[in-house]
Amino acid sequence: MNNRSDAWQLHGHTALVTGASKGIGLAVARELAGLGANLLLVARDEDYLEQVRLDLADDFPSVDVLGFAADLGDAEDRMAVFDWVADLGLPLSLLVNNAGGNRPAATLDYRPEDYRSIFEQNLFSAFEMCRLAHPQLVQHAHAAIVNVGSVSGVTHVRTGSPYGMTKAALHQLTRNLAVEWAVDGIRVNAVAPWYIRTQRSEPALADEDYLDEVLDHTPLRRIGEPEEVAAAIAFLCLPAASYITGQVVAVDGGFLNYGF
């Protein structure tokens, strides 16, 4: 870094963001582009992703914004993403594993195909994306991975046990890779959000009684915004965070510190 201001920008970086067309993923894409990073966006809905890509390209004309439609719960689609990255010839330096999904239910009500799908979407996809990205990331002086975990990987919340299991495992993957890949110059961190105002959370939060209960357990007394998670992720990507690795940063309005 030539001077301190270089630590707070991402010019020369290329970021692969998964689940990038909505919610936290889209907010992350905007935040990283605003810091100067080129964007490689991955999401399932090709038409919607292309519209998002065009909007971001208009808003951030000084960076490259490219998109690829893929279902990262599918192994062949994960391979296709990295074939695409290789063909582009852009030096990938940042990976944000945000793609995921859930089917909340009581533990005894899950069918095997349901909970296996949650594991594939939330955990195995991130594990494989990290492995596939490694040959690219290792070539960059300031490479970083940020995994999007959850407070449900730390404590019980009403998201269903498979979801909590996958997020707890994702947090542990973060710690393991941080140690294992430090020698390669790759930092690995995670964020653990509580309720964030997204399309996915809207149905639960529309129940006023449930919303009141959520707020009663949130010291800041409000629901978080996608941009607030994106800001934490962006910081963990910055050279300014060069001595931070293996951490799971709660973005939760104080939820995990709640006591009675």
Image (cartoon, helix red, strand yellow):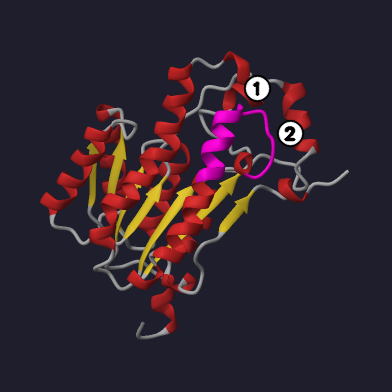
Depth check, front residue: 179 or 232 = 179
Q: The residue under label 2 is which amino acid type?
A: Val
Query: What is the number of the mark on residue 214?
Result: 2
Query: What is the number of the mark on residue 43?
Result: none
- Which residue reaches farthest right? 260
Residue at 79% across / 47% down in the picture?
A: 258
Residue at 63% across / 43% down in the picture?
A: 151
Residue at 29% across / 31% down in the picture?
A: 74
The answer to which of marks 2 and 1 sits earlier in the sequence is: 1
Residue at 39% across / 69% down in the picture?
A: 9
Q: Is residue 174 above or below residue 114?
A: below
Query: What is the number of the mark on residue 206?
Result: 1
Asked if residue 167 is among those painted magenta in the image, a careful observer would answer yes
Q: Position of residue 100 (x, y in %)?
A: 44, 35
Asked if residue 188 is among those painted magenta in the image, a careful observer would answer no
Q: Position of residue 123 (x, y in %)?
A: 44, 39
**Element assignment for label 1:** loop
Residue 193 picture quarter: top right
Q: Would you say residue 39 is visible in this rendering?
A: no
The region drawn magenta spans: 154-169
Mark 2 and mark 1: Cα distance apart in space: 12 Å
Q: Position of residue 19 (x, y in %)?
A: 38, 38
Question: How many other residues sit within 10 Å of disc 1, few (<14), some (14-19) or many (≥20)?
Answer: few
Depth check, front residue: 126 or 141 = 126
Q: Nearer the viewer, mark 2 or mark 1?
A: 2
Question: How many other residues sit within 10 Å of disc 2, few (<14), some (14-19) or many (≥20)?
Answer: some
**Element assignment for label 2:** helix
Q: Is residue 71 above or below residue 222?
A: above
Q: The residue under label 1 is which amino acid type?
A: Ala
Residue 28 in the figure: left or right of residue 62: right
